[in-house]
């Protein structure tokens, strides 16, 4: 069994190196950001282990600083992480027969892990379940390490954290631009941008996020058929 796990780990490690570089940088920024908001390194450490959702963890910082609103927090978490529902559906066959490891594979299914495990097939002499497990574990360990180091360094070094809270905005902008460049039709992008601007004007900067997500969800559901036809054309 030890040899099986070792072979799977060695096969998974090189595949996750690109994730390592990205997660360490973003994790460091997240840890420093949390420390600048008055939280010790234990907060990014525990949150990166328990939540393991980069964008949601950044948003959670502002939620911890605001008034107690469990319903709003639940809705925001569901909206931000809703894409994981579709990730899970896509991985049903991949994770079939993985035994007790399946619970952790489901929990650790972030964007990067989904991309690696969905697109790549493990070598024939490598156990499939352990390969997926180590890809997931390595990716999370990179994020936990980066977030924890950021929290520690932020408290030890005299860092200028002014503007660091813009990291989350920049991350979402980059994700939006990547999808824009890959897509041939931009109906959904324009729809999302339009709803966001409208809700910002109607509800203000402090309260527009939930209405925006609900509005986008309703419009995409209502016009799904028309959007798919336009893409097919």
Image (tube, rainbow, N blue to C red):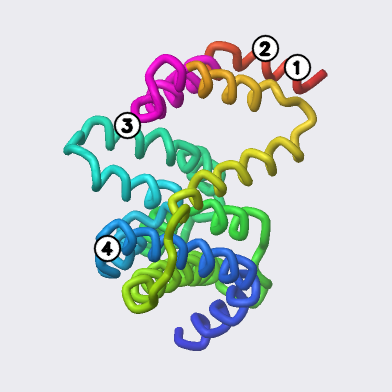
Which mark is drawn over residue 43? 4
Tell me how far mark 1 sits from mark 4, CA to CA: 46 Å
Residue 200 covered by magenta stretch: yes
Which mark is drawn over residue 74? none
Residue that mark 3 sits on:
75
Residue that mark 1 sits on:
230
Q: Are marks 2 and 1 in contact (CB under 8 Å)?
A: yes
- Residue range of the region highlighted in magenta in the rendering: 199-219
**Mark before the other along the chain sequence, 2 or 3:** 3
Q: Residue at x 45, y 22 (%)?
A: 200
Disc 2 residue crowd, few under 14, some 14–19, many 20+, Cα 10 Å: few
Tell me how far mark 1 sits from mark 3, CA to CA: 31 Å
- The secondary structure that dominates the magenta segment is helix
Choose mark 2 or mark 4, whichever is in front.
4
Regarding mark 3 in the picture, which secondary structure is present there? helix
140 to the left or right of 178:
left
**Mark before the other along the chain sequence, 1 or 4:** 4
- Which residue is outermost to the right? 233
């Amino acid at each position: 069994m030890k040899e099986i796990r070792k072979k799977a780990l060695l096969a998974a490690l090189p595949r996750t190196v690109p994730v390592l570089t990205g997660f360490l940088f973003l994790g460091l920024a997240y840890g420093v950001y949390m420390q600048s908001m008055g939280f010790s390194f234990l907060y990014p450490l525990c949150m990166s282990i328990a939540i393991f959702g980069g964008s949601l963890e950044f948003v959670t910082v502002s939620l911890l600083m605001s008034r107690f609103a469990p319903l709003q927090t639940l809705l925001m978490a569901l909206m931000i992480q809703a894409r994981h529902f579709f990730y899970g559906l896509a991985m049903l066959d991949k994770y079939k027969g993985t035994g007790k490891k399946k619970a952790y594979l489901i929990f650790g299914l972030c964007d990067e892990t989904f991309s690696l495990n969905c697109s790549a097939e493990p070598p024939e002499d490598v156990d499939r379940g352990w390969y997926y497990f180590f890809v997931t574990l390595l990716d999370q360990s990179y994020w936990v390490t980066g977030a924890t180091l950021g929290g520690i360094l932020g408290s030890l070094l005299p860092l200028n954290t002014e503007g660091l809270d813009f990291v989350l905005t920049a991350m979402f902008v980059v994700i939006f631009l990547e999808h824009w460049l890959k897509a041939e039709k931009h109906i959904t992008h324009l729809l999302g941008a339009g709803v966001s601007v409208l809700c910002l004007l109607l509800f203000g900067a402090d309260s527009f996020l939930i209405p925006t997500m609900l509005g986008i969800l309703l419009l995409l559901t209502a016009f799904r058929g028309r959007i798919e036809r336009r893409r097919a054309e």
